[in-house]
Amino acid sequence: MSAIDVPLPRVRNQTGAAPGTTHSGQCTHISQCTLCEAHCGIHVTVTDGKVSRIEGNPDDVFSKGYICPKATAMGGLHHDPDRLRTPMRRVGDRFEPVSWDEAFAEIGTRLRRIRKEHGARALGMYLGNPAAHSSGAFYGLMLRLALMTPNFFSASSIDQMPHEYAAWRVFGSNMLVPITDIDRTQRLVIIGANPAVSNGSLSVMPGAKRRIKAIRDRGGAVVVIDPRRTETARLADQHVAVRPGGDVYLLLGMLHVLVAENLCDRAAIAEQTSGWDRLTALVAGATPEAVAERAGVDADTIRTLARDHAAAESAAVYARIGICQQETGTLVSWLVMVLNTVTGNLDRAGGTMFSTPFADLPRAARYVPVGHAAWSDRSGRYRSFRAELPAVAMADEILTPGQGQIRAMITYAGNPVSSIPQKGRLDQALAGLDLYVAVDMYVTETTRHADFILPPVSPLEREDVALLTTIFSVRNNIRFQHRSFDPPAAALEDWEILSRLTAELLPAPLRQLLAPVRNRLIAFANPLRMTALALLTGPYGRLRKGRKGITMRQLKASAGGLDLGALQPRLAKVIATEDRLVTLAPDEFVEAAAAYLRKPADAAEGHYDLQLIGRRQLRSNNSWLHNVPTMTGGNNKCTVLMHPDDARARGLSQGAAVRVTSAVGEIEVPLDISDDIRRGTVAVPHGWGHRDTGWRHANTLPGANVNTLHDPHRVDAFTGTAAVNNTWVAVTGA
Ligand SMILES: Nc1nc2c(c(=O)[nH]1)N[C@H]1C(S)=C(S)[C@@H](COP(=O)(O)OP(=O)(O)OC[C@H]3O[C@@H](n4cnc5c(=O)[nH]c(N)nc54)[C@H](O)[C@@H]3O)O[C@H]1N2
Ligand SMILES: Nc1nc2c(c(=O)[nH]1)N[C@H]1C(S)=C(S)[C@@H](COP(=O)(O)OP(=O)(O)OC[C@H]3O[C@@H](n4cnc5c(=O)[nH]c(N)nc54)[C@H](O)[C@@H]3O)O[C@H]1N2
Ligand code: SF4
Ligand SMILES: [Mo]
């Protein structure tokens, strides 16, 4: 058990061991892979204290036995000798172990001193991606509240913020991002996502390949719109190689056809929406011929895409990160929501719908303030959205002297030095802080600058019920992550570490009063108790459903979670706009789209004549899985992908070392020639180039940080999300 001993409800099978699989020295545990949103069910076999096998859990109600190659990394991470297991304090250029109590006491004193001398704005926090994969996220947000600082940043602003902003404008809340009903649709159009590799995000779909194949098996069609013929495109009926950043034109062109040819669902529009006239006025001039060149897609294809969409029995457009990390991110997210709505595919089976998770956040969305434009960064360039500032503003907020400069940072489960474009300035910024505390289990490009690193238990030592993943799942479900290992005696989980940090920030009388009972109070508010409460009071709980309601006991005893059914129509219940209608044409979007329609086609910027996009890899997980040797090697390499014609024109050959240069930086990587990528476009994966970290294996791998090439000030206009999917570069022999 962890240092804070949490009493838990007694269950039939406390380790989660599958019946009949335990024998001397070997035990199989039911658990979950928590490396990405899919949270696939796994069976972890432990032999003599070591993970000997990880397999998909066939009884998991959602992932149904599927795992991707990353699942086995859960064992690699657990046993990784480089993973930190005790809190560390910086002493000169080294880290030395320190006790938890000493660490929290010193951090508390220093944080409070900085806050007293310089105000709350001098404290900053960054929340990274894996935070969302455990209940730790909620305790992270508690800490964020206790910090009371406008300087809060997260990986969302290099990720899904444009979807959230569009959802806020269109449906009234950032929490109302519609989910693709992939398992029932007859036509799936995927724009800027590669679920065959990623297994879906914001439409969480473990085993995406199987789900995509099933659409075709039941007579439906799948279309992928992507500058690269991706692993997903290979499963599709049609691949449309859009120009990077061309989606805004493609979608406006499709909407023009739908309106001009009277292919929209006028009954659904009348019932569900406002703003139809403004929308039709906007797209009136966006004929396929007018937008084709800028979309990089010919007019006939645009016309056919629109007609086929309208003709399908049910259809869903699913767009994800390829369109978010663009200057047009929010506009494209909006147009996708509009397209789904005007074709009658919002809130109906096979279209896009809202989930009913065990804690009904979609329904509560109406009452949660988003904190949009409540403040800005000190330069005035970026406004807050969802009570945070974009991560690209972080380096300046730390480095620029004056009132409100950040002097103390807390990062939780993030590696922004690698994951955010910041021209290398974040390295310098973090190194110069008065105090930097990292909640992380590795010494990374980022945490190596910390004064304290506070490591949580390994994911296999955690028991949890992830809420966020269920909110975005393509089917309602609730699943339990059992422990495969008991944590070492003194270990803490993320939620405990974050709660202890929060306690340090409480006002003096409360903090002192609390000291003797603090740990017991913290232990009382553990994630499983919170989950039990949410379950009890939520849509499936006993308070609502009486004896039919589900309980934690049932959940824990299940072999692979509980299926809560297909997505249900519930727009009328959840919509959070003032008039309770879908806002088809928010003013600021219409104006911005009209401006794009007036713009000429994007052209090469000087000698930077290739458009650089990203490439997510099956065995990488953003920046942090490269220390597990089985996740590296083979085809998991950092290379630049280029079309044969572009390589020939530059006299470059397969495998050659090349220099990729942009207006703000350069990297050297090997060349990979393939006609999978559109001419004029190149792709480099992110999360590589590990140097000077505690990841001893990863440090030895070739590769470079692609974010060196991206200009931090090229962002989505509405959210400040870094536009890393469309940077002009030149590629030359190294
Ligand atoms: N194996 C693996 N799985 C992961 C992750 C991982 O690192 N590795 N990360 C997880 C995380 S954090 C996330 S957010 C999700 C993301 O999940 P996805 O959104 O599926 O991510 P990508 O695979 O990057 O897909 C983005 C696609 O957009 C395309 N694209 C680039 N520019 C454009 C453009 O201008 N227009 C269009 N239409 N397409 C464009 C790219 O070629 C790429 O195929 O994946 C999650 N799953
Ligand atoms: N150029 C470019 N950049 C990108 C992207 C891209 O497509 N192109 N994709 C972006 C996307 S989608 C994302 S989500 C971001 C991710 O950006 P970040 O969240 O900043 O970085 P990660 O690489 O996910 O690093 C996660 C960190 O959390 C630590 N960690 C892992 N699990 C846990 C845990 O359970 N608890 C704690 N406390 N720590 C943990 C790891 O050791 C690692 O240091 O990167 C983005 N950056
Ligand atoms: S898709 Fe892969 S990485 Fe994601 S949860 Fe499933 S097994 Fe883990
Ligand atoms: Mo992400």
Image (spheres, rainbow, N blue to C red):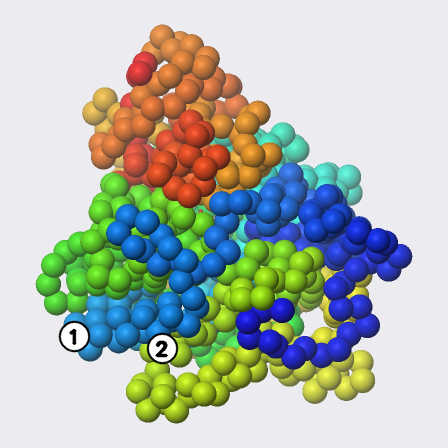
Query: What residue do we see at 57% from left, 25% from top?
Result: 634
Picture disc at residue 117? 1
Give the residue type that dot 2 points to.
Glu
Picture layout, residue 96 above or below residue 107: above
Pinpoint residue 175: horizontal percent, then vertical percent. Answer: 49, 66
The answer to whether residue 571 shows anywhere in this view is no
Q: Nearer the viewer, residue 638 or 345?
A: 638
Picture layout, residue 644 above or below residue 68: above
The residue that label 2 is drawn on is 504
Picture layout, residue 648 above or below residue 601: above
Q: Helix or strand or loop: what does disc 2 sit on?
A: helix
Task: Please state if 379 lies on the left or on the right of 254 as rendered.
Answer: left
Query: What residue do we see at 52% from left, 77% from top?
Result: 364
Picture disc at residue 40? none
Pinpoint residue 575: horizontal percent, then vertical percent. Answer: 52, 72
Q: Are marks 2 and 1 in contact (CB under 8 Å)?
A: no
Query: What residue do we see at 69% from left, 57% from top?
Result: 484
What is the distance, in whole Å, between disc 2 and disc 1 at their CAs? Answer: 17 Å
Tell me which numbered mark, 2 or 1, is placed earlier along the sequence: 1
Pinpoint residue 502: horizontal percent, then vertical percent. Answer: 39, 75
Rendered image quadrant of residue 375: bottom left
Q: Helix or strand or loop: what does disc 1 sit on?
A: helix
Q: Nearer the viewer, residue 608 or 389?
A: 389
Give the residue type that dot 1 points to.
Glu
Q: Assess disc 2: are there few (<14), some (14-19) or many (≥20) residues with their C-alpha within 10 Å of its C-alpha.
A: many
Query: What residue do we see at 50% from left, 38% from top?
Result: 626
